[in-house]
Image (tube, helix red, strand yellow):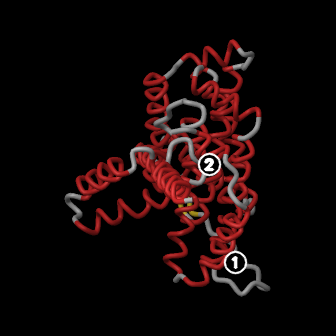
Amino acid sequence: MDPRLTVGARIPIKWVTLFVVIGVILPFFMDGYTTFQATLVMIYAIAILGLNLLTGFNGQFSLGHSAFYAIGAYTAAILYFHYGWPVYATIPVGGIVCFVAGFLFGLPALRLEGLYLALATFALGIAIPQILKSSHLEELTGGVQGLDVFRPAVPEMLPLTMDQWWYLIVFVIMLFMFWVAWNLINSRTGRAMMAIRDNSIAAKSMGVSTSLYKSLTFGVSAFYTGVAGSLSAIIIEFVAPDSFTFQLSILLFIGMVVGGTGSIWGALFGGLFILIIPNFAEEISTGLSYAIFGIILILIIYVMPSGFTGLVNLIRTKIRGRIGTTG
């Protein structure tokens, strides 16, 4: 996909304003459960955007981002459960811890590319849930029983329900994270990231420090996923190792591809897809849910080989071409 179609082009301010307005008023027209589901979609979108920064914009494959999602979630849960931190303060800390973990993991991973890097991240995603279950860390992590996280009450001066309040908090965080990603990709750093993705040898010959940018991108990607994990722990109010299996990594990867690799705002559609479609497949047939999910995924990839944003850009280009021909 041409990154200029999804990154370089400026989105008209009227569309951004419309999106923000709709996003703010939406929870007041939904019931509590639907608001909760919409909040999860935004959390997944943040995690998918983090993975897209690594894979879509820097060309590093990861099949283990569930590990960073788990680290962020457990950081928030441990700080709250054992040390009494306010849940609001645990969100950035979860991201920072994951940034450090991602950066350190990215250093030895510099020697790996393609399938070998994917295999290394796969091993990380498999290992973290087992480590969290370890008896040596049970006092800290709660072992297989997990830890409880309780959301604080809504400020008394606000006429909001708990689900509405946290929807709005996550919505603001998501907007901020998307804005930061947009500015990052459209900066010199972003151009260096994409140069490494397109041709690392050429980028290095032009003076780009590939090792530094790869490690930093891994850290930033993990930061986004860690923030999403922290928010997930708070919204669900519980963490357990079995919530962060390899299946979560696969779902995040699927969400990135379906939303559009190399796309920022496509992460929202990817988050919507990985929340709704598995549940939809489960409702059709419990025993054949994976088969139904696979069929749906194949059909979507066939219809949208470049992801949702690629389809939107294709339709927009054709409309403009017809308007130009008519004119």
Q: Residues within 10 Å of mark 1 (few under 14, many from 20)?
A: few
Taking the image as shown, residue 292 lies to the left or right of residue 126, namely left
Taking the image as shown, residue 210 lies to the left or right of residue 31, namely right
Taking the image as shown, residue 142 lies to the left or right of residue 227, namely left
Q: Quadrant of residue 51?
A: top right
Find the distance from the CA under tag 1 to the CA under tag 2: 22 Å
Q: Secondary structure at mark 1?
A: loop
Three-letter amino acid code at the position of disc 1: Ala
Dot label at residue 72: 2
Near-viewer residue (272 or 97): 272
Residue 132 visible in the shown view = yes
Residue 146 visible in the shown view = no
Dot label at residue 67: none
* Sequence-first tag of 1 and 2: 2
As drawn, the residue found furthest toward the top would be 205
Tell me the quadrant of the picture where the C terminus can be found.
bottom right
Near-viewer residue (102 or 80): 102
As drawn, the residue found furthest toward the right would be 157
Residue 10 position, x and y percent, is: 70, 51
Residue 276 position, x and y percent, is: 41, 64
Q: Are marks 1 and 2 in contact (CB under 8 Å)?
A: no
- In the depicted structure, whether residue 25 falls above or below residue 47: below
Dot label at residue 153: 1
Residue 229 position, x and y percent, is: 59, 52
Give the residue at x 65% y 64%.
Answer: 170
Q: Residues within 10 Å of mark 2 (few under 14, many from 20)?
A: many
As drawn, the residue found furthest toward the front would be 327
Q: Quadrant of residue 168?
A: bottom right
Give the residue at x 43% y 37%.
Answer: 126
- In the depicted structure, whether residue 210 falls above or below residue 98: above
